[in-house]
Image (cartoon, helix red, strand yellow):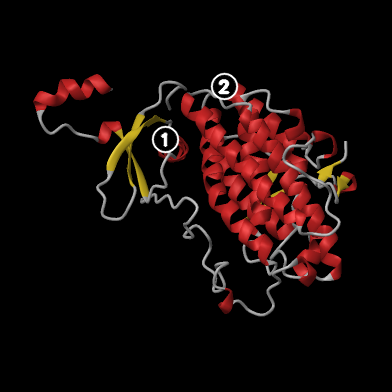
Amino acid sequence: MQTIGDEPVYEVFARRVEGEPLRHVGSVAASGDALARVYARSIYDEESWLEMYVVPRRAIIAVDDVRDEAVDAHA
Amino acid sequence: MSTPFPKGTGSQYAPASPRAGGTSRRDAPASLMDRPSALPEGCVAPLVDLVTALADNKHALGLRYAEWCSSGPTIEAGVAATAMAQDELGHARVLYGLLEELPGSPRRSEHEWSAADARTVAFVERGFSDWPHLIVANLMLDRVLAAVLETALDSRYLPLRQRARKIIEEERYHAIHGQSWLVQLAAEGPGVRAELAAALRDVWSDALCWFGPGDGGALGALVDAGVLTAAGDAVRRRFLAQLAPVLTAAGVPAPLKAAGEHWELAEPLPWDRWDERARRVRR
């Protein structure tokens, strides 16, 4: 259980139309998956997304060690 | 789990129904009513009362949510409150549009809306002094109004049915918001749980009376005519079946008792003070 203001970050990915690549549209901080979905939907509502996903940032793994520092800088 | 966002167009959130969809009227049975004049005589007044109270409460709830746009516990929470405010105000506008077609409706206009003659329940009139109060309104009032509108998803009265479909699609996210936040707040400790329990007691009678007495009371005529598919105890039981596990998970006490497969109220509701027309408990 995180305290408010210290919640995990979720990256938000969405697709506008069929066949278009899924793209990164932003991030939200939420206490859990359910609220992350609600927040992503209300914050990134500038498009009528065909589909949208939230991914816990901790689940995103850097492929190249050299990039670790740059990835951490986002955390 | 996939999370598609069919804003405005999607219908996969609507329950499967052989006569779903407002555009393919060819398939609709002849018994559907597509205009107010098709409503049975005794249905107009209770429908006007119900839609007025639904819209007034949604309008007031939207204004209350909006008060938290820039003061939620996190930026995300504030934006979510803003989105819910927009949804509720939009639902109210759509339902006021329904009233315009019905004879004998009270006058309502977006610009002249006043709380003075609004048929709103006390909890929303008083406002939300803190975030736990907003969450209890989200969990109870917002969900109760949605549960009543769910009984119009297969309404024989098309203007209501079409509006209910759009509204219910958005309400899904209000439900996730309220339930998730209740559990999160309750985990903060006994102090917050006591505050949530007090707010719950405050809203309890108004929220649970909203479905109407046993057979639905004034809503019974609407059920008989197929304008609604259920009212009263049947809808209340369905609502409690969704609410009780959330309250149990959160550890927030409420006057409920398990009775076999379903949940029952541990205390009777104040039906002697229930105002069937304004749909609120007299105070």
**Would you say A36 lies left or right of B164 here?**
left
Q: Position of residue B72 (x, y in %)?
A: 55, 24
The numbered mark at residue B71 is: 2
Farthest residue in the right direction? Answer: B272
Subunit ID for the residue under disc 1:
A
Residue B116, compared with residue B27, is above or below; it is: above
Left or right: B51, with B176 as reference point: right
The residue depicted at 70 percent of the width and 51 percent of the height is B95
The residue type indicated by label 2 comes to: Ser
Specify the label residue A32 is tagged with. 1
Query: Looking at the rendering, which quadrant does residue A3 occupy?
Result: top left
Q: Secondary structure at mark 2?
A: loop
Residue B129 visible from this viewpoint: yes
Q: Residue at coordinates 78% horizontally, 53% vertically from top-left?
A: B50
The local secondary structure at tag 1 comes to loop
Q: Amino acid at mark 1?
A: Gly
Q: Position of residue B252 (x, y in %)?
A: 61, 34
The number of numbered badges drawn on the structure is: 2
Query: Residue B92 location, x and y as percent?
Result: 68, 45
Q: Nearer the viewer, residue B275 or B66?
A: B66
Q: Position of residue B99 (x, y in %)?
A: 76, 54
Q: Is residue B156 above or below residue B271?
A: below
Disc 1 packing (10 Å; few <14; some 14–19; many ≥20): some
Does the rendering let one see residue B253? no
Q: CA distance from mark 2 to mark 1?
A: 21 Å
